Structure formats: C-alpha cells, structure tokens
Image: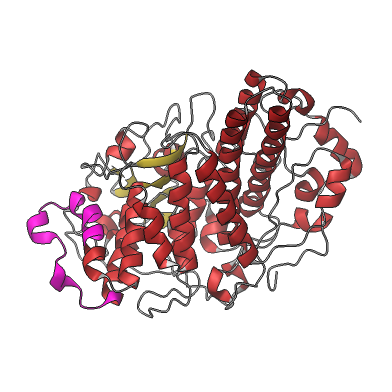
Amino acid sequence: MKNIIKTILLSVIALGMSSCTEEKILDLKPVNNILSPDAFTTPTLISTYMNGVYNAAAIGQYNAVPTSPNGGRGYVWGAAFVEQGEARGEDVVNMATFYELTYRATYDATTPNNVYYWVDGYRLINRCNIMIEGTTDAAAKGVITQAVANDYIGQCKFLRAITHLELLTYFSKPYFHTPDASHPGVIYREIGVNTNEEIASERLKPRNTVAECYSKILADLNDAEALITAVKNVGRASKSAAIAFKTRLYLQKRDWTNVILEGSKLSATFALTVDPYAPFQSPSSNTESIFSIQHSATANPTVNGALAPMLKDRALVCISPILWRDSGWLADDKRRENGKFIHTAAGIKYTNKYTDVTNRTDPAPVIRYAEVVLNMAEAQARLSNLQDALTLLNSVRNRSLANPATQAYTNSSFTTNAGMVAAILKERRIEFLQEGRRWTDIHRLQNDPIAAVATNGIPAKFANATPPAIAFDLSVPYVVNATIGAIPYTDRRFLWPIPQIELNTNPDLEKNPEW
C-alpha cells in the first residue's frame, strides 16, 4: 500500500467516502506536507508534525474545503467553539445567515455548522492518536528521548480529552440525564488510523456511554498533567491547562469537591489581572490566560471564521439586548466600556475582545483563570460554603466595578446557596460573553437541583435580525421581547444530530432521539 497519511480524520468513518474516494483522500498530504512513514524519523519532523496537530485544532476544514494552512473556519478550537457556543445561547443576536441555523435551531444531520464540529473534532482526535503512536515508536527506536516523547504524548492526550468533552456538550445529553450516566455519549477514539485494516476495525465502533467518556477524559487529563513538561504555556497544552479543564469537567459532573481540589492547584501559578481587559489586550503575556489557540496572519480561520471579523467587523453577531439590559449587569461596569470591551457601530453593541480584523491574529481563549475561580466559587456555594464562595466571586467581579467599596457583594447579599449560585452564574454570562462558554452552562444546568438556576432546553432569544439601536440605550426604557421561542429539553433540537456522513458508513450507530 502506498504511503498513507495519518493526519486526516477517519476518512470513511467521518467523511462517508466510497473506497475509491477513500484511497484518494488517504493519498493527500497533510498540512505539514509530511507523509506519516517519514513524520517520526527525526526530532525536527516530529516537532513539525506536532505543529500540524495544533493546526488541526486551530483551522480545521469546512464544507469539504481541502485542509491547508489557512483553509478552514476555526473548527473546533480556533474560533468555532466561541461562535457556535454563543449562537446556541441567548446572550448574542445572530444578525445575518452565518449562524442562523445554529441560532434558530433549524439544523439537521447535513448542515455544515454542526457536521464539521463532529468532522473536525474527530480529525483533530485522529491526529492526536497518530502523534501518540508515532512518538511512542520514535522513543522506542531512540529517535527522541522518552522524556520528549512523554511531553508530546501529554499534549495530545490533553487535546484528545478536551475535544471529546466538547463533542459531548453538543451531541449528548448532560451527565445527569440518567442516574448512572449510562445514556449515549460519543465515540471515544484512541487509535490512530492509517491503514485499510484500521479503518475497517474503527468505522463500526459504537458510541460510548457518557460515563465511559467522562472516565476516559479524566484519565487523559490526569496523564496530561503528569506527562507535559511545561507548567504554564498559554499557546500550548500545559500541566496547568489539564488541571483547569478538570475543574470544567468536574463542574459538569457536579463533583464540587474535586472542582475545588483541582482549582486550588493553580493559585500559585495564575492570578486574575487587575484590569479585566488585560487578557485580551495582551493575550500571550498576562497572569490569567491558561490556554489559547494561537493564530498568525498566514494561519487563521479566515475572514469567514476568525473572531474579529465575525463578531465585530462584519456586523454578523452582536450582544443581545437580553443580557445588555439585564439588571444584574451594572450600568457602570467596566465590561460595558465602549472602545475597550465594547465596539459600537450605528448604536449596536459588539464585543471588542477580538480586534485584529486585518490579519486575524487574535488567539481563541479556550480557558482563563477567571473561569477556574468562578468554577470554584460555584462549587463552594453548592456546598454551602458561602464565605469562600463570596470571596472568589468578588475577586472576579470587583475588578470590573466602578466603585467596589459600595457595589461589591457582602455577607448580607446572599442568605442561601441558591442565591449565591444564581449570582455566580450571572457573573459567568457577563465575564465570558463572546468566549463560547454559554452553551456549556445551559447544557450542564438542565434540571439542576437548584430550581432557581435550572435550565430547560434552549432559552428564548431575541429576533434573528439587527436589533434597533434604542435596545442598547440604557437611558431609554425598552421592552426586550424574545421572539424566538424557547425549545424544551425534551425536543430533539436540544442536541445536534449525528452527522449523516457518519451514519452512511456506520449505519448501526445509535442516532440522537427523533433525528
């Protein structure tokens, strides 16, 4: 068999190709132009291959556009997780057609926005698996030391873990949908595919349960923490990034004690910036950013995917009046500051967290220490440790207040853990606006034990159109109407359907209900 690359997704498994097309796909060179039999023969080539793994995380492929250094739209981690995660929620308004299918929940098993989340997610996972296998073999042959191999393996296990976790939030019900999380998760792939035999063995794999997926994700994150060399490296996977993601995983699992245990590990390494805008003003050199996907002028998700063009310059997605006029967001909060956090055009409010509309070099902020702090705050509140929760919540919120001395929450602000949790969740919506966090929170809060914060399906949204400028003028009364109705948790549209191209090659794979 000819040299077969191992850097693309599971060809037929993910792309639904015929055997003839399959061979053509397999003969294509990856983005780094190295065929896999050669990719692990020298330290330089191995390093280059690892760059290709990160490229798969940052760029992806969209709607059958061939993979190239600059040919995708940022699926999954380069921009799409921000754009899709926000468009599924109610805190932004989709103003055009780019995210309309996501925003209005009119997707099906063939629509590209959701299909390529799956396709590019598994393409990245496959590259990770190949890198793990290749570096293991290279170390055994003495091409690189075991310590170097372990670092690469740890980075790939981190990327593999977080991508499976991300897929779970779109294609599977949350952890507590069943008492033992035995409901369908996603396919947890741990084998790199580069031969027809491997394709044949992998293509018909069933979905793991959600419980199985969480167990494997946690194992990968624990391995990543142990194996990765760097404690902190904002542009690459690090020990700290693995720890931070464990707080996210445990939060979704409602394992409050472990959220606190893991988050506490990072207090000596990271600190909240005094200026809340600093993580975006200096995204690669601040005390708060833990892991971000890097872009350059020659490698980015293009004008049709990069964060600054899509969320600011092209006026495609604005901040929703639903959140902008929420009384829980103080009018003089620094995160409303025009020209800093906010960009205003024709009276409409857009995020200004991403500013490079020309070269599209803004990093995609995958996880910040502010999230870890609020994860711990929520866990403490859930455990009725209100004083600890208050301290953590205020540490994030106070830096954005015009007058913390009078506006900060105090011990008398909350008399119950439910009230504290509600305040923390509101703070998350404000702090992480346009960072892709909203859908994950909506997803994990379904049927929450605290009725006051529980979500039920997809919330109602502002109309899919350009809002009137008056909707953003806080000095003028305005009634916010959510004209796109809520979608209940029991509706099939709560989940994205398994892509048809996956079902074409794995016809017995369990579909999501009613799709």
Residue at figure coordinates x 61%, y 24% from the top left: 47
Residue 57 in which image quadrant: top right
The answer to whether residue 81 is magenta is no
Front-most of residues 334 and 195? 195
Residue 159 in which image quadrant: top right
Front-most of residues 250 and 111? 250
Residue at figure coordinates x 90%, y 43% from the top left: 19
The picture places residue 315, in percent across and down from the top left corner, at: 41, 44
Answer with left or right where residue 72 lies relative to residue 509.
left
Give the vertical position of 129 relative to 418 (above or below). Answer: above
Q: For the stretch drawn in magenta, what is the main secondary structure?
A: helix
Give the vertical position of 92 relative to 442 (above or below). Answer: above
The picture places residue 75, in percent across and down from the top left corner, at: 58, 43
The picture places residue 287, in percent across and down from the top left corner, at: 30, 38
Outermost residue on the left side: it is: 405
Residue 498 in which image quadrant: bottom right
The picture places residue 299, in percent across and down from the top left corner, at: 54, 27
Q: Which residues are magenta?
A: 391-417
Give the vertical position of 296 relative to 438 (above or below). Answer: above
Answer with left or right where residue 196 lies relative to residue 59.
right
**Whether residue 368 can be seen here:** yes
Residue at figure coordinates x 41%, y 32% from the top left: 357
> Which quarter of the rendering shows the N terminus?
top right
Total of numbered circles in the picture? 0
**Whether residue 77 can be seen here:** no
> Which quarter of the rendering shows the C terminus?
bottom right
The answer to whether residue 401 is magenta is yes
Give the vertical position of 147 relative to 74 (above or below). Answer: above
